[in-house]
Amino acid sequence: MAEKRKKKKLIQEFKDFAVRGNVIDMAVGVIVGGAFGKIVASLVSDIIMPPIGVLIGGVHFQDLSVVIKKAVIENGIEVAPAVVIGYGDFIQTIINFLIIAFCIFLFVKGINTLKERLERSPEEPEPKPKEPSNEEKLLTEIRDLLKENKER
């Protein structure tokens, strides 16, 4: 009997978890993120990398590799494929990641700025810069006096 209640409780907990808004939001985020990743990959490989390749002598990053062991070919048939370290693909992936990370940073920064503006009431003025402390004022005066003495 207790085992049956545990199963029902587990099923109910799963239902509660699955229909929570956060899970739906996360799923949408994953799907949109995957599509965004494809857009950025195309941007990098089709628009950004060709000019960079021209600048570095016509090299395509995908072609950069180190052959550890050459392919074994007997009678025109490849018996064993070559063992290759494709570091160019790795460089390409890093560039894709950096661009995606930067775009997400800008997006999150924009959303946070928008949230701050919406949370502030219309009557509430923009926050004023903090007034310098007494120490900072004193240091500024000393700096100005030193500057005056130096000019004399």
Image (spheres, rainbow, N blue to C red):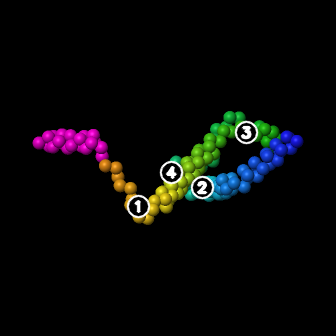
Say what amino acid the circle numbered 2 marks: Val
* Disc 4 crowd, CA 10 A, few/some/many (<14, 14-19, 20+): few
Q: Give x and y (percent) for residue 35.
A: 65, 57
Query: How far separated are the C-alphas under marks 1 and 4?
Result: 52 Å
At 76% from the left edge and 40% from the top edge, which residue is drawn? 81
In the picture as drawn, the residue positioned furthest to the top comes out as 68
Secondary structure category for the residue under label 3 = loop
Q: Which residue is mark 2?
A: 40
Say what amino acid the circle numbered 1 marks: Glu
At 66% from the left edge and 39% from the top edge, which residue is drawn? 85
Q: Which sits in the foreground, 115 or 59?
A: 115
User: Of callouts 1 and 3, which one flags the residue occurring earlier in the amino acid sequence?
Assistant: 3
Say what amino acid the circle numbered 3 marks: Ala
At 61% from the left edge and 47% from the top edge, which residue is drawn? 93
Q: Which sits in the foreground, 109 or 56?
A: 109
Label placed on residue 82: 3
In the rendered view, tell whether residue 11 sits above or below residue 85.
Answer: below
Q: Which sits in the foreground, 128 or 52?
A: 128
Q: Give x and y (percent) for residue 152.
A: 11, 42
Quadrant in which the N terminus is drawn: top right
The answer to whether residue 129 is magenta is no
At 64% from the left edge and 38% from the top edge, which residue is drawn? 66
Nearer the observer, disc 1 or disc 2? 1
Q: Which residue is mark 4?
A: 55
Query: How far separated are the C-alphas under marks 4 and 2?
Result: 21 Å
Nearer the observer, disc 4 or disc 2? 2
For the magenta stretch, what is the residue range? 132-152
The answer to whether residue 138 is left or right of residue 72 is: left
